[in-house]
Image (cartoon, rainbow, N blue to C red):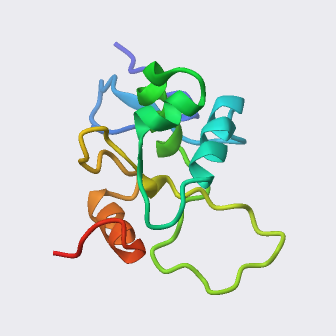
Amino acid sequence: MRQRRPSPGTRHRSGGRGSTHSTAVRRGRPTVFEERVYAVVRRIPRGQTRSYRWVAARLGNPGLARAVGNALNRNPRPFPLNPPTHRPTNAPTLVPCHRVIRSDGTLGGYALGPAKKRIRLQQEGALPTV
């Protein structure tokens, strides 16, 4: 039997033959919903955190918390761990998705990994250093 090839816009996580679990790879521009999420998240002050549910409520539906998390996972402009001191005025606006945590106070997911999320929040004074 012939194996089906993945579509060009997918990447297989498990990698083995016959794997059916795949995730879309970011191609192109963010969706309208993602841009709305990023606009809300950009307003979270440095040194503070908000929950995924809080962001979803600002969008009009607290039940969209998981969709907010998915949008932030696809963030095309995350904050670097060591941001430059000067950015050109025409540089894209960064999205501080690391400032969004779970409602129970735990960190939740982060595209760059939970250790980097913790470090970034500690650098901003949003988490105590251990």
User: Which residue is nearer to you in this view: 42 or 17?
Assistant: 42
User: Which residue is nearer to you in this view: 97 or 54?
Assistant: 54
Residue at figure coordinates x 71%, y 31% from the top left: 32
Instruction: State the image quarter where residue 90 is shown.
Output: bottom right
Most distant residue in the left direction? 130
Residue at figure coordinates x 43%, y 60% from the top left: 48
Looking at the image, residue 8 sits to the left or right of residue 120; the answer is right
Looking at the image, residue 47 sits to the left or right of residue 86; the answer is left
User: Which residue is nearer to you in this view: 95 or 1?
Assistant: 95
Looking at the image, residue 39 sits to the left or right of residue 100; the answer is right
Most distant residue in the top direction? 1
Instruction: State the image quarter where residue 104 is shown.
Output: top left
Residue at figure coordinates x 82%, y 74% from the top left: 89
Residue at figure coordinates x 41%, y 54% from the top left: 49
Q: Classify 88 as above or below 56.
A: below
**Quadrant where the C terminus is found in the figure:** bottom left
Most distant residue in the right direction? 90
Q: Can residue 31 be seen in this view?
A: yes
**Quadrant where the N terminus is found in the figure:** top left
Q: Can residue 11 be seen in this view?
A: no
| Residue 53, image x, y percentages | 42, 32
| Residue 79, image x, y percentages | 53, 65
Instruction: State the image quarter where residue 63 is shown.
Output: top left
| Residue 16, image x, y percentages | 27, 35
Looking at the image, residue 41 sits to the left or right of residue 30; the answer is left
Most distant residue in the bottom direction? 85
